[in-house]
Image: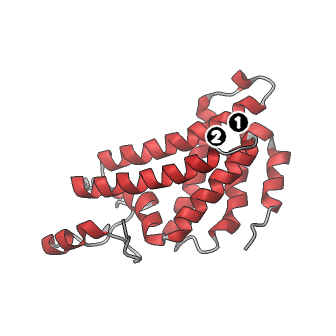
Amino acid sequence: MRWRRAERPTPPRLESRLDHEGEGGEQGRANVSEAPREWDDDRLAAYEEAAVELCTCVTSAYDGPGGWHDRVWAAGWAAMSFLEDDPARARFLLVDVNGAGRRAQARRDRLLQRLADMLDGGRDQLEDPAAISRCTAEIAAGAVYATLLGRLDGGGLEQGKALLGELIYLAVMPYLGSRAAEQELLVQPLR
């Protein structure tokens, strides 16, 4: 699928339909005083397609060789590359979905659960994996998402790979401890 590069994206197969219906207006975060507007089936399908592409890319990187920490870095690098490659698609996946109603947000939540699945592997790094719960991975995934959302909502992910150390810090700190996680902040990506 080709994405139109724009500040507020509309998936291409919806462009003509939305323009015809006059619904191609402002997207993004929902106004708190308004109920979220449900996406139609076409827009949900476009979201699902983009989400599958992202998950395939990230899972492939995470499933590679190495220990958990290296695989988290590989997955983070793959995700950031995917998001940087097409800012309109990144905004569609991470920002626009927030004002899109229950069905779209349920799909977004599945993405976050997949991220939490990867991060939950960090419990195996602990002497006692039962010492922390799955909820820790969900919180870390939420922190990563909130950071990305803030960057995208504030303009974009230019220099996104420079942000990767901060995101990895958020992801690994509950499992490796703050001292080890602080080392992630010192990593500078190759350009």
Label of residue 84 in the image: none
Please state which amino acid type lies under the numbered disc 1: Gly
Q: In this figure, which residue is indicated by the disc labeled 2?
A: 119
- Please state if 137 lies on the left or on the right of 34 as rendered: right
Quick one: 55 or 22, which is closer to the camera?
Answer: 55
Give the side of residue 74 with respect to residue 116, left or right.
right
Give percent across and percent down for residue 43: 27, 58
| Residue 73 % position (x, y) | 70, 52
Horizontal placement of 135 versus 104: left or right? right
Q: Secondary structure at mark 2?
A: helix
Quick one: which residue is furthest to the front in this view? Answer: 65
**Which residue type carries mark 2?**
Leu
Q: Quadrant of the N terminus?
A: bottom left
Q: Residue at x 19, y 73 (%)?
A: 16
Q: Are marks 2 and 1 in contact (CB under 8 Å)?
A: yes
Query: Which residue lies at the image location 58% right of the left edge and 57% below the top edge?
Result: 79
Q: Nearer the viewer, residue 106 or 28?
A: 106
* Few, some or many residues within 10 Å of mark 2 (<14, 14–19, 20+): many
Alpha-carbon span between mark 2 and mark 1: 6 Å
Residue 122 in the image: x percent, y percent?
A: 70, 36
Mark 1 lies on residue: 122
